[in-house]
Amino acid sequence: MEHEDAKVELSRHAGIVEDYYEDGFIGCLRPYSGIRAENFHSVVESLLSVGVASAFTNTIERCIAESVCRITVTARRWGIDSGGMLVRNKLISSDDRVQLRRWITIIETMMLDLLAGQKPHETIHGYCEYVAEFGWGGNAAFFVPLLGSAIETDDFGDRLQGHCAAITRLGSKAIAISDSLVLARRRKWEWYEPQERCAAEMRGYIDQALAAIGTTQM
């Protein structure tokens, strides 16, 4: 997604422009029509898209920060807080409150990481854990290059596990980054003792991802 398009997308999901999405992240909360996973995936894609530019500057545009804060603060106020209108009027279920809270946490953490100067592929570990558990959205193709960059550069084993689990869930659609997985498999994984066990565990996660993609290349 292009930078300017992503900014517009965030503002529409936040409900702060005239042509806001009536069924967007905030729009679907008032009047309440149920939370929608596709809105969450769309917000994450938009945030990472604007993050490409912010990774090379010391600032993030105020309109971007406002949109993200409007999304998370409003959603928490209406759907999470015990006195929120959706909770008070018993419109939102307990399960949806849990899901909404998790979405907010992922978005906020990603935003904080971008503000700290991290590159988009360095901020996706929480999102990867989520999609590994609940599945990808319709925009999964957008995330494949980011996963490749994360696999190639991230030395944190717990993050690698989440990345590989997300790739496993994606399956053959991640074929473009199979080489990144192969290179990662050849890396020395020594971040805990005994090192042999560490390497075996990390390569096991990578092998699962490669098998899901449909390649046995090692």
Image: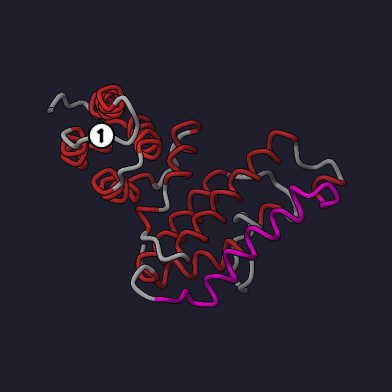
Magenta highlight on residue 12: no
Q: 41 or 19, which lies in front?
A: 41
Identify which residue is drawn at 31% across, 50% down. Answer: 146
Above-or-below relation of 185 to 79: above
Q: Quadrant of residue 34?
A: top right
For the C terminus, the quadrant is: top left
Above-or-below relation of 200 to 63: above
Chief secondary structure of the magenta portion? helix
For the N terminus, the quadrant is: bottom left
Mark 1 neighbour class, 10 Å CA radius: few under 14, some 14 to 19, many 20 or more: many
Q: Quadrant of residue 2?
A: bottom left
Residue lying farthest to the left in this orientation = 217
Q: How are the residues colored?
A: secondary structure
Q: Position of residue 189 (x, y in %)?
A: 25, 34
Direction from residue 17 to residue 197 in the image, left or right: left
Identify which residue is drawn at 43% across, 41% down. Answer: 128
Magenta highlight on residue 75: yes
Count of marks placed on residues: 1
Q: Position of residue 11 (x, y in %)?
A: 56, 68
Direction from residue 151 to residue 107 in the image, left or right: right
Amino acid bearing label 1 = Trp
Please provide the residue range marked out in magenta. 58-85
Q: Which residue is under mark 1?
A: 189
Identify which residue is drawn at 35% across, 41% down. Answer: 156
Q: Position of residue 174 (x, y in %)?
A: 26, 38
Direction from residue 96 to residue 89 in the image, left or right: right
Identify which residue is drawn at 63% across, 71% down. Answer: 16
Secondary element at tag 1:
loop
Residue lying farthest to the front in this orientation = 193
